[in-house]
Image: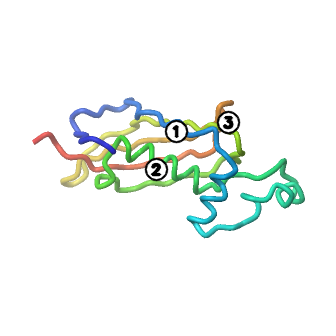
Amino acid sequence: MAHEVYYEDINVGDEMPELVKGPLQKLQHVMYAGASGDFNPLHTDDDFAKAVGLDGVIAHGMLIMGFVGQAITQWIPRKYLKKFGVRFAGMTKPGNTITVKGNVVDKLVEGSENIIRCEVLAQDENGDIKVTGHFEAALPLKG
């Protein structure tokens, strides 16, 4: 759970705490399929994935996006998050370990809100990028 974070304590260039997930297991793919309702066999059936030209199953992109969201909200309380978007950049396979990291790229005041803008990415143990993204949060002042 995120602790309180104040606008005054954040600076451009600050890095968010990294989150490491994995190695991913095929069982996670099946569990995520059930939770999300996305039963595309690309995520759960190696034979099907191979029949369409892959080496085997791949993780749901939204699972990896969920890891990014988890990393953000372990740093910044969810109630302050205003925007969150990603671009899917690569396939994740069973056995991959995903590391989510990010940094503050802008800090400004818009109206009465104290905004930080951050870039994030998720990559595997080889440095292959799976997701890039950004988020914006409106943080409180110390008071």
Alpha-carbon span between mark 3 and mark 2: 19 Å
Counting from the top left corner in percent of width and height, residue 66 is at: 51, 52
- Secondary structure beneath disc 1? strand
- Above-or-below relation of 131 to 35: above
Q: Residues within 10 Å of mark 1 (few under 14, many from 20)?
A: many
Counting from the top left corner in percent of width and height, residue 126 is at: 68, 30
Alpha-carbon span between mark 2 and mark 1: 9 Å
- Secondary structure beneath disc 2? helix
| Quadrant of residue 122 within the rendered picture | top right
Q: Residue at x 64, y 36 (%)?
A: 124
Between residues 62 and 30, which one lies in front from this camera angle?
Answer: 30
**Which residue corresponds to mark 1?**
100
**Which residue corresponds to mark 3?**
128
Q: Residues within 10 Å of mark 3 (few under 14, many from 20)?
A: some
Disc with the residue nearer the chain's start (3 vs 2): 2
Q: Are marks 3 and 2 in contact (CB under 8 Å)?
A: no
Q: Which color scheme did the rendering employ for the protein?
A: rainbow
Query: Can you tell which mark lies on residue 69?
Result: 2
Q: Residues within 10 Å of mark 2 (few under 14, many from 20)?
A: some
- Secondary structure beneath disc 3? loop
Disc with the residue nearer the chain's start (2 vs 1): 2
